[in-house]
Image (spheres, rainbow, N blue to C red):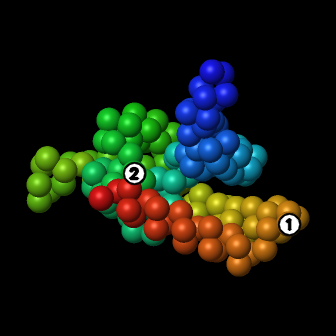
Amino acid sequence: MRSFYIMEYDQLKLENQLCFPVYGASRLITREYQPFLDKLKITYPQYLVLLVLWEHDNQPVNDIAKKLILNTNTITPLLKRMEQQGLIIRKRSDVDERKVLVQLTEAGVNLKAEASRIPEELARRLSDSDLKIEELIRLKQSLNTLISFLSK
């Protein structure tokens, strides 16, 4: 009777879940970023917002949230803290008052030069592993495909 129970629920074993290795890898990669982000006095979610704004400044909150796969009620407190830190300014759009635009301050722009070293440092750390750069690129492509599918 017990073996039937185990076989019937193999799909519930942690080792058989797709979500867990993705979750675990995400948490561990974020942990690798932390020493670099601590030097910049920002969190990982703040870093992601800055990446979006460094690519294209003065964006609506909804666009940033969509790019980061976040709800606006999640990103609003994050943006509020960033504004208090002097990294961004939030302002109502002159064209559509329902939209709140997010713009980098000089301090936010200035962090870009320091942050530009982070990807290289992380790549250097990952190169110490058995993973090849080609494998990491394929993994990123596969994850982007998965994200695209799940975002529909």
Drawn side of residue 89 relative to residue 44, left or right: left
- What residue is drawn where x is 18% and y is 54%? 93
Give the CA separation, mark 1 to mark 2. Answer: 31 Å
Q: Secondary structure at mark 1?
A: loop
Q: Amino acid at mark 2?
A: Ile
- Residue to which mark 1 is pinned: 130
Labelled disc at residue 95: none
Q: Amino acid at mark 1?
A: Asp
Labelled disc at residue 69: 2
Q: Nearer the viewer, residue 69 or 48?
A: 69
- What residue is drawn where x is 30% and y is 59%? 152
Instruction: Name the spot of residue 21 as percent of width and height, x first.
Output: 64, 48
- Answer with mark 1 or mark 2, whichever residue precedes in sequence: 2
- What residue is drawn where x is 28% and y is 51%? 62
Residue 47, compared with residue 123, is above or below; it is above
Drawn side of residue 81 relative to residue 93, left or right: right
Instruction: Name the spot of residue 113 as percent of width and height, x first.
Output: 63, 66
Rendered image quadrant of residue 19: top right
Mark 1 crowd level (few <14, some 14–19, many ≥20, 10 Å Cα): few
Q: Secondary structure at mark 2?
A: loop
Residue 54, compared with residue 87, is above or below; it is below
Taking the image as drawn, is residue 30 in sight?
A: no
Taking the image as drawn, is residue 78 in sight?
A: yes
For discs 1 and 2, the disc positioned in front in the rendered view: 1
Mark 2 crowd level (few <14, some 14–19, many ≥20, 10 Å Cα): few
Q: Residue furthest front?
A: 1
